[in-house]
Image: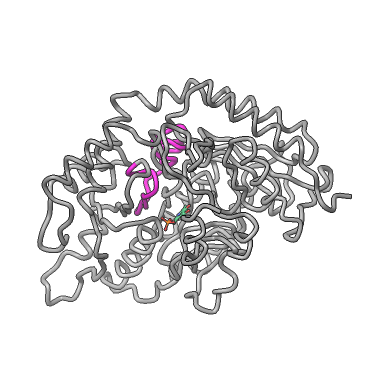
Amino acid sequence: MNKWIKKDLQHIWHPYTQMKDCQKFAPILISKAKGVKLYDHKNKFYYDTISSWWCNVHGHGHPKIKEAIKKQLNSLEHVLFAGFTHKPAIALADKIISLTPKNLTKVFFSDNGSTAVEVALKMSFQYWRNNGKKKKTKFVSLDRGYHGDTVGAMSVSGVDLFNKGFSALFFPSYKVPSPYCYRCPIGQKKENCNTECINSLEKLLKEKGHEICAIILEPLVMAAGGMIIYPKTYLKKAAALAKKYDVHLILDEVATGFGRTGKMFAAEHVGVKPDFMCLSKGITSGYLPLGLTLTTEKIYRAFYADYTKKKTFYHGHTYTANPLACSAAVASLEIFKEEKTLSRIGKIIPLLHKELMKMHALPFVGDVRTIGMVGAIELVKDKKKKTPFSFQERIGMQIYRQGLKRNILLRPLGNIVYLFLPLAIKENELVSILSRCHKVIEKIKPWDAD
Ligand SMILES: Cc1ncc(COP(=O)(O)O)c(C=O)c1O
């Protein structure tokens, strides 16, 4: 075994990993990456079809982002962000405000997706306090939503496998059924659907709106919950209900932001104006950690007062608005413009969707869902009954292993195989990925399929 891998196994505890599995399947030592390919220490390549956990946008090793980071490093690597500021953060705030819904005018920096969410939750909570509405203490979220791994973010998440074991730590929050069309929570048929599943949200807001601070949603794609892609009408109606019942709308665009759904932000598909927008992952194109929470003038004003009035927002992280990360983010946004990234992917998205839909015909493929550069394939044991593979069958692990053999990094979420592609992908690379993916799924051998 390579000596670095040996050392890894000796000292490192990897995230979302049962370390016992690593005795049999050691982590792959990645030495370099270029475009949409990762290369291991033996120079074997793997297509990074999940954008290195949904953050890479313009491909690995983009010269413009590398240059921007190097240039910034020559003048300032980091400085505290209270009482001090710097040009990369100012330039980024200015750019991001010009790209997001018009009602969002203020930017609060942090350093990852979970903290971007924590900031939104805490700001919403304190907003109501600062305005004397002390009964508003709770949040609403979707029962399959995912917003991060910190305790606050987990409190409004619902991916049982990740969260349930910690539930005793959570603050109380309301959950409503997810608009999971393949497994419709109200048993509705697609042809007759009028997003009636939203009714449970309306009922809750009607009864409990007075004690609710905000509703938090991943717009259009519930990513970690299984790449559940839901109807635009649901998002539109949820936004209208938030307004009607005087609760904030927090849009968690940590995964969906920066072109992943075909538009810069998923909110644009519907034209919703959230009270908070959380951004991270793709913001630096996956080069450095950074989180942003955007909010409105109205919310900002509720905190703006004489210091002694105790309305200050007491929250901050050491690496808030790191200048290197901000420079990478500014460069990434410039690339969107210079390389016409969104119109370029607009041309290959139909191919991606068309080819993925063909996988419906494969055994064990129950559902195929797509939006922008995201595609998900839900595997089932029985197509008619939609019976999922059991946890014990570890179908995801089989897909992962088979994918690696075919130079493709697939990391299913349980039974859901998905592509979450870097926007830098070229058509020939996409064709190659789809063909490899098809072969992997075609060859599934369930350990226990009846
Ligand atoms: C929608 C969403 N929100 C928040 C997070 C948490 O981001 P991070 O892992 O950077 O803390 C994630 C991570 O996958 C996410 O998908």
x then y, percent, for residue 250: 40, 55
Q: In this view, does 397 lie above or below 270?
A: below
The quadrant the N terminus occupies is: bottom right
**Residue 383 relative to residue 322: left or right:** right
Between residue 226 and residue 98, name the one nearer to us.
Answer: 226
Query: What residue appears at the point 62 percent right and 48 percent down from the top-left corner?
Result: 412
Query: What residue appears at the point 42 percent right and 31 percent down from the top-left corner?
Result: 35
- Residue pushed farthest right? 450
**Residue 430 relative to residue 274: left or right:** right
x then y, percent, for residue 76: 13, 50
Viewer can see residue 190? yes
Which range is magenta? 259-284
Query: What residue appears at the point 42 percent right and 38 percent down from the top-left corner?
Result: 33
Query: What residue appears at the point 26 percent right and 71 percent down from the top-left corner?
Result: 130
Viewer can see residue 205? no
Confirm whether the magenta stretch covers residue 425: no
Between residue 443 and residue 322, name the one nearer to us.
Answer: 443
Ligand 1 is located in which of the four quadrants? bottom left
Confirm whether the magenta stretch covers residue 260: yes
Q: In this view, does 292 lie above or below 308?
A: above
x then y, percent, for residue 27: 54, 53
Between residue 210 and residue 120, name the one nearer to us.
Answer: 120
- Residue pushed farthest bottom? 168
In the rendered picture of this protein, how many numbered marks are placed on residues?
0
Q: Name the image quarter holding residue 242.
A: bottom left
x then y, percent, for residue 448: 84, 53
Q: Which colour scheme is used?
A: one colour
